[in-house]
Structure formats: structure tokens, C-alpha cells
Amino acid sequence: MTLSGKVMVTGGAGYIGSHAVLALLDAGYRVVVIDNLVTGFEWAVDRRADFVNIAVEDAGVRDVIRDHDVQAIMHFAGSVVVPESVQNPLKYYRNNTAATRALIESAAENGVKHFIFSSTAATYGNPTKVPITENDPQLPINPYGMSKLMTEAMLRDVAAAHPINYGALRYFNVAGADPQQRSGQSTVGATHLIKIAVEAATGKRAAVGVFGTDFATRDGTGVRDYIHVSDLADAHVAALAKLIEAPSDSFTFNCGYGRGFSVLEVLDAVDRVTNMTIERRIEGRRAGDPAELVADNSAILAALDWTPKRAELDGIVRDALAWERKLAELGK
Ligand code: UDP
């Protein structure tokens, strides 16, 4: 499956976006990245892709769409830090909801046919049961989740009114790095567990805080469904093929593996992979953290030509660690 024009990847200089760019290029698509480099890095964009430094809400995006014959958009750009969204909700409603409204308008008015959106398990809030299916209630408990849920609603309405179809992918916990180390999680001041743990392993920090040991889980610590970023990127390529194949159908899928690991299990994996004992500091719960988030992924497995290849936790940690070491070598 391919396109005569290009795929535009917003946020293609960021963590997940840069891996999607690699997966698209490796699958033979032509790619133009737009990114305003507020959190992304131009060096993270594969040289086979074109790059334009512009914000998604900028009117100039229409020119990019026309000049590059953009037929599909993968939209990763946005703000992603949950506690920050609680402190500064309007930033999230601007960067995620309002900016995406402008982008969808640019797309719909300039003949873009397919749209893939980075949604999130945070749209479910505190789940009533795990694993979570796509039809479970969406009751976000923070502005980040709400800003993404509002975008899902816009896409549903726009796809009903205009000749565009969409795939909304609700990510669970994304981790790891390109196994060939062409990209990885490079965000400065990252807050995600596996990134923090491999930073501790390379000496960037002294210890890892364990945020809460009194959850109703097997060992009291939070359980998450960690998905390898390269598998997630492949899911986007499979989603695009589906949108091209069935132009009147849209879909929403959970992206996870259907199994969870606790914080302590993740830290055990980091110890195994590094052959070290990373210091753990037991701390209180972090505001807004649910006990357990695990995806029911049966819908995406049934609908898309996608087979997860990297679900093994130690492999995810190994790739994250290799990238962390590469960042340290590069002085980044
Ligand atoms: N966590 C932790 N220490 C950290 C970072 C995260 O104990 O330094 C826990 C967090 O409370 C949650 C899990 O690890 O139970 C995953 O958190 P992360 O921030 O990676 O992703 P989230 O699930 O919040 O999107």
C-alpha cells in the first residue's frame, strides 16, 4: 500500500514522531516533517525526510500541504506532561485541542485524505476495569486527557462531514528506542519511568523514586502496559495502510500489549539488563496516577496487519539503555 504524494508527520522531531518517520521511510513512503522544535530536535529527523520548521496551527501549513502533495497526516505534535496540564490547562487546550482544530481545518480544506491521531489511555481516566477496551467510559482525570478526548470528538465529526478518514490510536506507556539506535527518547527533563531508570543506570541521576507502594496491585506499585516505540511506529504504518485501503472507514484502537508490569518489576528488569542495582527511593503517590492501566488490544490485532515484535520487557529496557548511552556519548 502506498501513496502518490507524501505523508506529513507533525512532531516528527519528537520521540514517537521520529520513530514513525523511520517506519514510514522504511516502508517506502515519502515524508515531510513539520515541527516547531520547542521540544523536538532537528537532528532526530531522518535525512530522507523533508523538514519544515513551522507550528501545526500556522496558516503556512496549507502551503506545506500543497507544495508537498500531502495526502495523509500523522499528528504527533502536542504537549504531553500530565502534571503540567493540571497546572496550566490552557496550554494543553491551546497546543493540543486548538492547534489540532487548525490542523484538521488545513487538512480538510486542502484535500488531505487520511489523518492519524496520537490519542492516549489518559482519555479513560481511572478505569473501572482492566484490561481496558475501546468502548469503556472515557472520563479523563486531567486536562491532558481531556484535551486529547476533545480532539477525538472533532475528528469523528469532521470525518462524517468531509471526505477524510481517520485513525485514533490510544497509546498506553511508550518506551524503548529504535533497535538500530537511529532515534530514541531524548527529551530533556523526562518524567517517564523507563527513561528515568536508564538515566540512573548511566549516572545522570542518583536513584529512582517509586511513587506509591499502597496501590491495589500485586506488589503495591503502579502497573502499566509498556509498548516498544518501534512496535507503536509500525502500528501507525499499518493504520495508514488500512485508511488508504478503506477510505470511508475510520477507527479507534488501543495500542498496548495487553499485559502490565509494576514499577518494581520494571526496576528489576533494569537491574537485570544493566547488571547493576539501581537505588530505589520509596516516595508517596504522584497526584493523578491510576493503579493499573492495561490495554485490551484485541481490536487492533484483529483489524490491522500488525504483529507486535518487541513486547519483551528486558528488550524494551535494553533498547532504552542503548539509546541513553548513545546520548551520553554524544554529550546530549
Ligand atoms: N513512576 C515512578 N517513578 C518515576 C516515574 C514514574 O514510580 O520516577 C511510576 C508512576 O507512578 C506510574 C508508572 O511509574 O505508576 C509509570 O509512570 P510514567 O510517568 O512512566 O507514565 P504514566 O503512566 O504516568 O503515563
Image: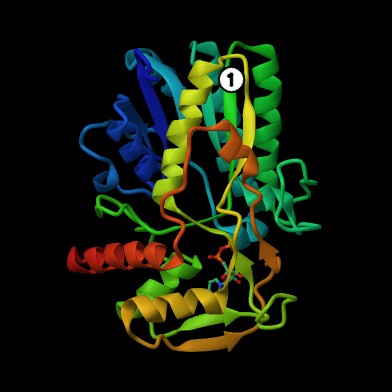
- Residue 165, picture quadrant: top right
Res. 180 in view:
yes
Give whichever of 119, 294 is nearer the camera.
Answer: 294
Residue 288 falls left or right of residue 239? right
Quadrant where the N terminus sits is top left
What is the basis of the colouring in this image?
rainbow
> How many labels sit on residues?
1
Res. 58 in view:
no
Type of residue at label 1? Asn
- Image coordinates of residue 47 in percent, x first then y, are 20, 37
Residue 19 falls left or right of residue 80? left
Which residue is at 40% across, 42% downward?
Answer: 17
- Image coordinates of residue 54 in percent, x first then y, are 38, 33
Quadrant where the C terminus sits is bottom left
Which residue is at 75% across, 76% downward?
Answer: 216
- Image coordinates of residue 167 in percent, x first then y, are 58, 30
Q: Give above or below for 65 relative to 132.
A: above
Q: Which residue is mark 1?
A: 165
Give whichever of 265, 45 is nearer the camera.
Answer: 265
